[in-house]
Amino acid sequence: MKITEEDIVNALEGLPENKKHCSNLGVQALRNAIHDYYDKEKK
């Protein structure tokens, strides 16, 4: 499953233009958390 910035904006039923960068930060944070989880599970 691929989650995009647009998915975040849609889930929140929109964001003001000056806050749309937050959706990018949210996607990156989620990807990093998933990556960290899988790295820890391998150990």
Image (cartoon, helix red, strand yellow):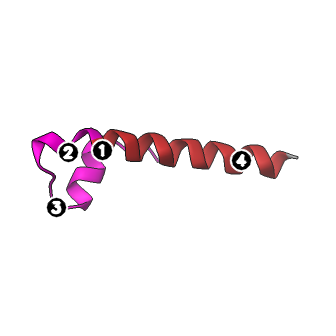
Magenta-span inclusion, residue 10: yes
For the residues labelled 1 and 4, say whether their Cβ atoms are less than 8 Å apart.
no
Query: Sequence-wise, which precedes: disc 2 or disc 4?
Result: 2
Magenta-span inclusion, residue 36: no
Q: Secondary structure at mark 4?
A: helix
**Nearer to the camera, 5 or 25:** 25
Q: Which residue is mark 3?
A: 13
The amino acid pointed to by label 2 is Lys
Q: Is residue 11 left or right of residue 17?
A: right
**Structural distance between the alpha carbons of marks 4 and 3:** 30 Å
Q: Which mark is residue 22?
A: 1
**Structural distance between the alpha carbons of marks 3 and 1:** 14 Å
Q: Secondary structure at mark 1?
A: helix
Q: Is 13 placed above or below 6 here?
A: below
Answer few, some or many: residues within 10 Å of disc 3's Cα (few below 14, many 20 plus, some between 14 and 19): few
Q: Secondary structure at mark 2?
A: helix
Query: Sequence-wise, which precedes: disc 4 or disc 3?
Result: 3
Please tell me whether mark 3 or mark 2 is closer to you in this view.
2
Return the x and y of residue 21 as percentages of the image width and height. 26, 38
Q: Which residue is mark 4?
A: 38
Please tell me whether mark 3 or mark 1 is closer to you in this view.
1
Query: Sequence-wise, which precedes: disc 3 or disc 1?
Result: 3
> Which residue is the extreme one toward the left?
16
The amino acid pointed to by label 4 is Tyr
**Structural distance between the alpha carbons of marks 2 and 1:** 6 Å
Q: Which residue is mark 2?
A: 19
Residue at (30% x, 44% y) in the render = 22
Chain part drawn in magenta: 1-21
**Nearer to the camera, 32 or 18:** 18
For the residues labelled 3 and 2, say whether their Cβ atoms are less than 8 Å apart.
no
For the residues labelled 4 and 3, say whether their Cβ atoms are less than 8 Å apart.
no
